[in-house]
Amino acid sequence: MVAKGQKRKLRREDEGGGSARESQLQSVLDISMDKFHRDQALVEPCLLRSVLINNTLRQVQSEVRAQVESLSAAKIPAKLKPEPDFTQLSPPAEHHAPLSSPNAENTEDDFMAWTSEEDFSLSSAISAILKDLDAVIDAGQGPCASQRAPLSSVENLTPCPLRTERTSDMASSIKTELMCPGCPQDVALDKLLLDIDPSVFEPELNLLQGFSVTADDLVKYLPSLSKSPSASSSSSLVSRGQATWEIQEIEHVMDILMRTYPQS
Amino acid sequence: MMAGVGGGNDFQWCFSQVKGAIDEDVAEADIISTVEFNYSGELLATGDKGGRVVIFQREQESKNRLLSRGEYNVYSTFQSHEPEFDYLKSLEIEEKINKIRWLPQQNAAHFLLSANDKTIKLWKISERDKRAEGYNLKDEDGRLRDPFRITTLRVPVLMPMDLMVEASPRRIFANAHTYHINSISVNSDYETYLSADDLRINLWHLEITDRSFNIVDIKPANMEELTEVITAAECHPHQCNVFVYSSSKGTIRLCDMRAAALCDRHSKFFEEPEDPSSRSFFSEIISSISDVKFSHSGRYMMTRDYLSVKVWDLNMENRPVETYQVHEYLRSKLCSLYENDCIFDKFECCWNGSDSAIMTGSYNNFFRMFDRNTRRDITLEASRENSKPRAMLKPRKVCTGGKRKKDEISVDSLDFNKKILHTAWHPKENVIAVAATNNLYIFQDKIN
């Protein structure tokens, strides 16, 4: 038996209104991340609980990915053939790649070079994310840290201004990037950031749902799902997994960024 | 067969007894974690978070008190498990009793299995009401007699004494579970039993403690690929080669131990296809099965997930034959229940003696009964307010929307800290035991 409200909700999503769904997505993500981190702090978290929370996080992640896909698919011109590269580049949820990150030092330097011209909170937030994430990863996987792929210099890429459809532009730029198998994955992150028009940023981020993003918050939101519930697991870096995880991270960061824009 | 054994509105449930402290301040150790009647219903055992087992015995029905059946009084209390420390992993092992299962009675003594997260113990509960007197070599107070003073030989005689109930651990089954034990189940051969943790199920012989057979192992090679755990397991009541186990994804697997030593491949796989229109982020969590129980007949099994109870025919794997909604009004509150962790609560369920009714708990100290024949259901409350002797329990109702009628309670007023996770139904009569945090309520149907 289907409740009335459910059906109406589905129709609203089809029409693109889905803000209730999005806000639930956000709530579930917040709560799940909070629980995930709390459980990580425990010596022996309950395995059933950990598995259920992890599966929920994976579900949220795939929902975010699906939203990104649908947004970018809607805006990409016909000549840019939409290949199903998402499946190639991002593995199925079960084969969860171990945590890795782009070379944060380079990113940070590039960031600093770029943002020395314009000072806005989001780029610093993103650099803070990457720095913190790097610290987390280094703590967990010491010897593997050196295997990170270096980011190419930001100086070679030119920023382009964003207009009202900035969300879709960003999505399309990401999608374009991801659809070139030959492109280094690390360039995607730079492109993402350079696509942001600094002039549209207010000193205080005023979001649609009224939730404010701080660097700490953004760090929290990035799922570190490869941390296994059991205490006795040792993860090894696989370069493909590393690349695919970066894609996931990019998508996730992008989603956070999308939320900073008032959707007109 | 007892005339008219059933549940729901056909019977009038009355308060009989309540055990436990009345204080508002509940000590963590006193929280009841398992309740189980023995095979005859004469004994009722409870386990708590403090590792203690309390056994109640039903007094003989006296002719004077015609209005109620015998009451349950404390028979034996003992400390089953103590907190332990795993030095290798630097982990504390809780003494909380997760499950108690009785063995069928074969002599004057009673035997039960009690399990915490890691260890199962077989306890013998025996009575002593006689004492030997007139020993030759020692005095009544136990002191050795001077051999030179013994001039005659006498035969000790058995003299009555005050009844003493002793509980002694006869077997300790340890070091077989890496993960937390969630179920134990005695096999119908009365020689073996199974114990299940999150990832493995072991088969034990009651006489042998130094080894067990692993019969199910779902641990993946890479723990990062783990997406499903075992939540409950039970032996078939008649076929000693058959057992079932449920999972966190809402599936039940029936295994036949004759097929292979390792029962990783199921003989039957029970899963209800998901209704796509009701899919949400919480679909998987609420589908996780918290309890599985075979019917006494062995033809059906019942599973409890977060919002419903389902009865399955063992001959039909693709869907349950009956589904009962326990508290459907919580479906719109799942996000909050996820946030406050209530969504992870593990409710148990039980059959009545004739398999015509089932019972399970809910929040606000409510518990629900469903009559399978009439399809009627009833919600009752275990509370001190309704605890006058032989007071009839009034059906409760939760208001789901619109104008709240008198005596109804709105969903937002429910107390989610008062949860009834453990209930038990007497195997032969309409007597039920309901654990409400640190109190044990016993209800009976009114004798006409």
Image (cartoon, rainbow, N blue to C red):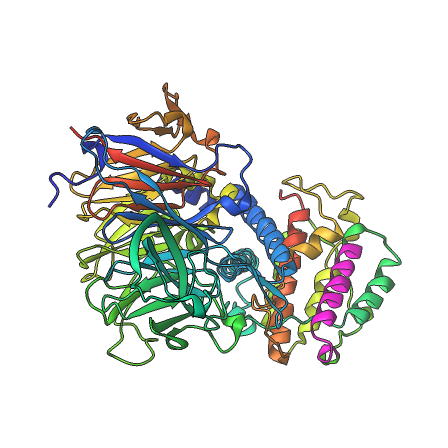
Residue that extends furthest to the top in the rendered view of this protein: B406
- Viewer-nearest residue: B331 or A2: B331
Q: How many marks?
A: 0
Residue A142 coordinates in the image, percent (x, y): 73, 76
Residue B99 coordinates in the image, percent (x, y): 40, 56
- Viewer-nearest residue: A161 or A98: A98
State left or right for residue B220 relative to residue B191.
right
Viewer can see residue B172: yes
Q: Locate the N terminus of chain A by quadrant.
A: top left
- Viewer-nearest residue: A56 or B415: B415
| Residue A126 occupies quadrant | bottom right
Vertical order, B166 against B205 (above or below): above
Q: Residue at 22% x, 54% y: name it.
A: B295
Q: Locate the C terminus of chain A by quadrant.
A: top right
Q: Residue at 78% x, 65% y: name it.
A: A158
Q: Which residues are magenta?
A: A123-145
| Residue B106 occupies quadrant | bottom left
State left or right for residue B238 relative to residue A137.
left
